[in-house]
Image (spheres, helix red, strand yellow):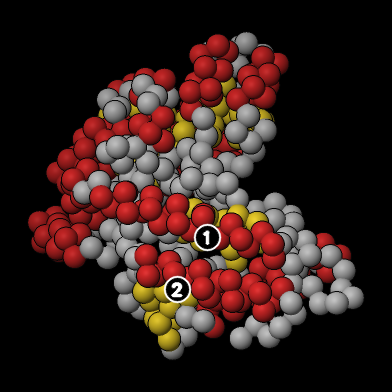
C-alpha cells in the first residue's frame, strides 16, 4: 500500500500540487506561523466573529449549561435546548418554516441530495458548484448533469431535454467559493418553475455577508423564500463558529429527520457551539456596520488591485469578500522561457507569489487544480470586517512589490 501511495504523492509534488498544513496560534486575521506574525487574507471569517470575545463568553456559558459534546445523535438524546433555539433562529434568518442542524456543510449537502434523489433522478448543477455538492450527487446514485456557469438559459434548455417522469433538482452555490461571483436566483427559480424542478442553493459564502440583515443571497436579491426549495448554510464562515444547517419547508425538514443518514447516524453538533452561534446571530443582525465596513474594503481592494492586470495578474469580477487573483500564462517568466502552460501550468507561479507575500508578513494561499480548472491557479484573497484599511494598504503594498519583482524575474524575497 505505501509504495502505491508514495508514487501518487510523488506525482502530486511534481505537478506543484502538493498541499501542506500550516499550524497557527493566535486569533485571526493576525496569526503566528513559522515563527513570525502573519496578517491573513485567506480566512472565511468574513465578519470577524471567530475571535469576538462575546462568542467566547457565550461558548463558555454554553459548555457550563449543556456540556461540550452532544453525547448522542439528535434522535437519541443529543438534541438540546441550544440546538432547538438555534434551529428556530436560523429558520427566521433565512425566511423559511424550519431549519435543521448538521455537523458540517459536506454532511448537510449529502443529507439533502441523498434524501431527495435516487438512481432514476437527476441533479443539474452549475458547472462551478462546490465539490461537496457533486460528491453528494454521486453518492446518492443520481445522474449528474451540468449547465454553464451562471447561465440560467442553458439550465432551462437542459431541463427541457430531461424526461418528465424524473425528479429533478437544480443545484447552485449562492456565492461561488473560488470565483466569488453570485448566482442569479430569480432566473434559476423561473426555469425551475417552468420545468417543475426543485431549486437548491448552497449559500455557505453568502449567509451573514449579503442582505440587509445578513440573510444571504436570497435576501440580497429580494427573492421570496418559497421559490427556493432547499437552502443550505454554514456556521463556520461569517457566523464564526462551526457546523451547518438546511432550511426549507416543514415537510422537507421532517423528511430529512426521517430519512437523511448523515443526520440520523451522527452525534449532534456541540451544544456549546450552538449556544455561541445564537450570539453570532444577534451580532449579524444588530451590527450592520460590519457589513458596511466589509463593503468598503472590497471596493477599495478592487479599485487599487485592478492595476495588477499590467503584470498579467487578473482580478476576477467579484462583488463579495472573495477576491481571486488569477496568475496569467506569461506571468513571472524569465527571458527565453515559454508560457506558463508550456512550463507545466501556472501552479508554480502562484506558489511563488504566495511565498513572496508570506516572506513579507502577509498570508494568502495559492489555490491550484483540481480545486480550480487547469490554467487558472490563483491567490484567493478573502477580506474580513476584522481587517482595517491600514491592513489593506499593507497587503496592496506588499502585493504590488512582490508582483513587480517576480514578474521581472527578480528574487522572491
* Residue named by callout 1: 304
Q: Is residue 6 visible?
A: no
* Of 70 and 155, the residue lying toward us: 155
Q: Earlier in the sequence, mark 1 or mark 2?
A: 1
Image-quadrant location for residue 1: bottom right
Q: Relative to residue 275, is residue 106 drawn left or right?
A: right
* Of 132 and 127, the residue lying toward us: 127
* Residue found at the very far right of the displayed protein: 336
Q: Position of residue 321 (x, y in %)?
A: 44, 52
**SS of the residue under disc 1:** helix
Q: Nearer the viewer, mark 1 or mark 2?
A: 1
Q: Is residue 158 visible?
A: yes
226 is higher (above) or lower (below) than 19: above
Q: Residue at x 21, y 35 (%)?
A: 88
* Residue named by callout 2: 394
Cα gap from disc 1 to disc 2, whole angstroms: 12 Å
Instruction: Tell me the quarter of the image containing the C terminus.
Output: bottom right
212 is higher (above) or lower (below) than 321: above
Q: Residue at x 53, y 24 (%)?
A: 188
Marker count (numbered) = 2
Q: Position of residue 365 (x, y in %)?
A: 55, 68
357 is higher (above) or lower (below) than 191: below
Q: Residue at x 41, y 29 (%)?
A: 221
Q: Position of residue 281 (x, y in %)?
A: 22, 46
Amino acid at each position: 500500500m505505501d509504495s502505491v501511495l508514495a508514487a501518487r504523492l510523488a506525482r502530486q509534488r511534481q505537478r506543484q500540487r502538493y498541499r501542506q498544513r500550516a499550524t497557527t496560534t493566535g486569533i485571526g486575521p493576525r496569526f503566528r506561523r513559522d515563527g513570525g506574525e502573519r496578517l491573513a487574507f485567506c480566512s472565511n471569517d468574513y465578519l470577524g466573529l471567530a475571535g469576538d470575545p462575546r462568542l467566547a463568553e457565550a461558548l463558555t456559558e454554553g459548555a457550563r449549561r449543556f456540556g461540550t459534546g452532544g453525547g448522542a445523535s439528535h434522535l437519541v438524546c443529543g438534541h438540546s435546548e441550544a440546538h432547538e433555539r438555534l434551529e428556530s433562529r436560523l429558520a427566521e434568518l433565512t425566511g423559511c418554516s424550519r431549519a435543521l442542524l448538521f455537523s458540517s456543510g459536506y454532511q448537510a449537502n449529502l443529507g439533502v441530495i441523498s434524501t431527495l434523489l435516487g438512481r432514476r433522478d437527476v441533479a443539474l448543477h452549475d458547472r462551478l458548484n462546490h465539490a461537496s455538492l457533486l460528491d453528494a450527487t454521486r453518492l446518492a446514485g443520481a445522474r449528474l448533469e451540468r449547465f454553464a456557469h451562471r447561465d440560467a438559459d442553458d439550465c432551462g434548455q437542459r431541463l427541457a431535454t430531461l424526461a418528465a417522469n424524473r425528479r429533478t433538482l437544480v443545484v447552485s452555490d449562492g456565492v461561488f467559493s473560488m470565483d466569488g461571483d453570485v448566482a442569479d436566483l430569480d432566473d434559476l427559480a423561473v426555469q425551475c418553475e417552468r420545468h417543475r424542478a426543485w431549486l437548491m442553493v448552497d449559500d455557505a459564502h453568502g449567509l451573514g455577508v449579503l442582505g440587509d440583515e445578513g440573510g444571504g443571497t436570497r435576501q440580497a436579491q429580494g427573492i421570496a423564500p418559497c421559490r427556493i426549495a432547499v437552502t443550505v448554510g454554514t456556521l463556520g464562515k461569517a457566523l464564526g463558529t462551526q457546523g451547518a444547517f438546511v432550511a426549507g419547508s416543514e415537510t422537507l425538514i421532517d423528511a430529512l429527520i426521517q430519512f437523511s443518514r448523515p443526520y440520523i447516524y451522527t452525534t449532534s453538533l456541540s451544544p456549546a457551539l450552538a449556544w455561541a452561534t445564537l450570539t453570532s446571530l444577534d451580532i449579524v443582525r444588530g451590527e450592520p456596520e460590519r457589513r458596511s465596513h466589509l463593503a468598503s474594503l472590497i471596493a477599495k481592494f478592487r479599485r487599487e488591485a485592478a492595476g495588477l492586470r499590467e503584470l498579467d495578474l487578473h482580478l476576477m469580477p467579484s462583488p463579495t469578500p472573495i477576491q481571486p487573483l488569477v496568475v496569467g500564462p506569461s506571468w513571472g517568466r524569465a527571458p527565453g522561457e515559454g508560457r506558463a502552460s508550456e512550463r507545466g501550468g501556472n501552479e508554480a507561479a502562484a506558489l511563488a507569489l504566495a511565498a513572496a507575500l508570506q516572506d513579507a508578513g502577509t498570508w494568502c494561499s495559492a489555490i491550484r487544480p483540481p480545486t480550480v480548472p487547469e490554467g487558472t491557479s490563483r491567490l484567493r484573497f478573502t477580506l474580513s470586517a476584522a481587517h482595517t484599511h491600514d491592513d489593506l494598504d499593507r497587503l496592496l503594498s506588499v502585493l504590488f512589490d512582490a508582483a513587480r519583482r517576480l514578474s521581472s524575474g527578480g528574487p522572491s524575497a
